[in-house]
Amino acid sequence: MSRYPKPMARLIEELTRLPGIGPKTAQRLSFFLIGLSKEEAHNLASAIMEAKEKITFCSQCFQLTDADPCAICADQRRDRSIICVVEEPKDVIAIERTREFNGLYHVLHGAISPLEGIGPDQLRIPELMARLGPQVQEVLLATDPNVEGEATAMYLARVIKPLGIRVTRMAHGMPVGSDLEYVDEVTLGKALEGRREL
Amino acid sequence: MRGEGIVLRVRNMGEADRVVTIYTAHYGKIRAVARGARRVRNRLLSPTQVFTHGRYLVFPGKGLHTISQAEIVNSYQEFRDDLEKMAYASYITELLDSFTEEELPSQELFMLLIAAFSLGTHGRFALAARAFEVRLMQELGYAPQLHHCLGCGSAVQENLRFSPEGGVVCPRCAPRYRELLPLSNGTWELMKRLTEWDVSRFGILHPSPVALGELERIMRNYIDFRLDYPLKSLEFLETVKAMPKDGSD
């Protein structure tokens, strides 16, 4: 690293902090950045600063937002009787891309993990419970279909059901475009279990 | 490396990889990378889920090994569909992970894990957890002394107490020990069977809830005495046990 001029060495060091970026990639990126015009470099730097300064969490759903409440929570056309619970902010983006869901969201910022010592009180579960007023009729649990996601979904079902609210879970099934023979037995079993009439 | 194993722990690595800790029948505990195992269509996605019993083909590496192929023997899906079973299975896997070193083979511990999971699938995780604790300690060389007093070495019969330091204490030696726990004759008999019987026979045991409760307190203290840090899954297990059941899972 000492072979680089000091400011460039610092840039490489900072880039190495990014996820999935090793020293080699960081060096390549730094050469690219040095090659940018002053204006382009300034735009990149100001975009990072603007995102850092303006992005906060929505006080209702805890999605990333630049205005509180976020665009989804503020939209009066959205169905307020159903809340979709997800683990991470990027899950909201994924579901929004489908254009199939018109309700509200709640981002937990993680999942219950008995093996990592992450319990219900370390997630945004109390805030979710506080949102479950009389207008909420259904909570859709869209946590990941892995051990942590299932633990979170089962825990939430146990605490929400006694309130008389309908609790639903995202369906498990075969990926669109896949070959049946390559689908593993667990997924196939779940797909059979959740079969529906045509 | 080729053979059967049970996944104890999974950690995400990089963009789409997983580091999987597997307890194998022939090599003991191993850690291996499953490349691309977080992608939806990857063949390693399902066999590298926690609690999965599978057949694995692993290429040895200098640090981490690499999983090349895997197929499921038993996914133990029921542990993922029931909060209490999941909490117990997490406790058992964390216990095994905490007490074992990598690549020290023990066929007995693998069979013990299978036996405990098998009891768990039949809804008998309270017995499975106690049996696993007692037998794990025994296999690792920490077997509690059950036939002779820890203090004077005399053969013990009744009015016993248990010391987390290592076994039963007779009434005469009891005043010399601190933190003694009550040990009824029923629990003492249960402990002896769990140390002496073949693991495949544990299913025919039907101890009373009182004996299981007493043994739970004894083994908790016994394990705490030997482990420097608290088990993370224990808090979750206690939370789940305290929750009212509503039949939703």
Image (cartoon, coloured by chain):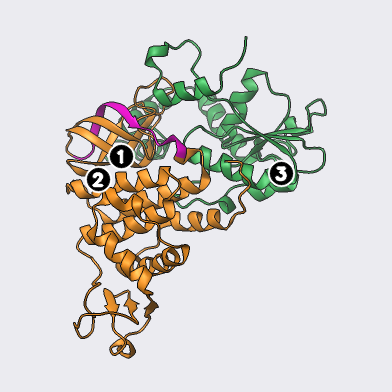
**Residue located at (71% from left, 44% from top):** A59
The x and y percentages for residue A17 are 41, 39
Nearer to us in this view, B145 or A130 = B145
The amino acid pointed to by label 3 is Ser
Disc 1: CA contacts within 10 A as few (<14), some (14-19) or many (>=20): many
Query: What is the display colour for chain A?
Result: green
Label pair 1/3, CB-CB below 8 angstroms: no
Label pair 1/2, CB-CB below 8 angstroms: yes
What secondary structure is found at the residue carrying circle 2? helix
Residue indicated by mark 3: A59
Residue indicated by mark 2: B110
Q: Earlier in the sequence, mark 1 or mark 2?
A: 1
Res B132 quadrant in image:
bottom left
Q: Which of label 1 and label 3 is nearer to you?
A: 1
Nearer to us in this view, A194 or B17 = A194
Residue indicated by mark 1: B6
The x and y percentages for residue A40 are 53, 23
Total number of numbered discs in the rendering:
3
